[in-house]
Amino acid sequence: MANTGITVPDELLEDFDDKVFELKAEGEIDRDASRSEVIRTLMEEWVEGNSKSDSTATMATAD
């Protein structure tokens, strides 16, 4: 399995962690799930077309 690193703004990471905490408290996510597991699951859902979001994200690329 690849070990991939990404850079995200601090505020985005804090918001993400808050949302994960909220979903864990509601029982939507396993309380023992790591951030990596949550991101991996979201990636799998997006690739498989099972994302809850119908929006198309705009991706920035390096020139």
Image (tube, rainbow, N blue to C red):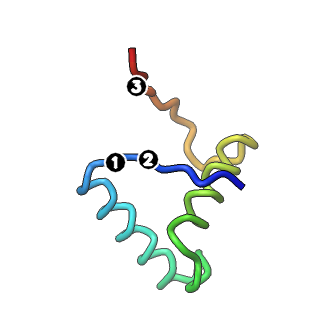
- Which of marks 3 and 1 precedes in the sequence? 1
In the rendered view, would you say 49 is above or below 59? below
Residue 47 location, quadrant: top right
- Circle 2 packing at 10 Å, graded few (<14), some (14-19), many (20+), is few
Element assignment for label 1: loop
Gap in Å between the C-alphas at discs 1 and 3? 12 Å
Q: Amino acid at mark 3?
A: Ala
Q: Amino acid at mark 1?
A: Val
Rendered location of residue 53, percent (x, y): 55, 44
Q: Name the outermost residue toward the top.
A: 63
User: In the shown orientation, is residue 52 left or right of residue 26?
Assistant: right
- Discs 3, 2 touching: Cβ within 8 Å: no
Element assignment for label 2: loop
Residue 37 location, quadrant: bottom right
Give the residue drawn at x 44%, y 26%.
Answer: 58
Residue named by callout 2: 6
Give the residue drawn at x 65%, y 59%.
Answer: 41
Give the residue drawn at x 75%, y 43%.
Answer: 48
Quadrant (top left/top right/bottom left/bottom right) for the N terminus: bottom right
- Which of marks 2 and 3 precedes in the sequence? 2
Gap in Å between the C-alphas at discs 1 and 2? 7 Å
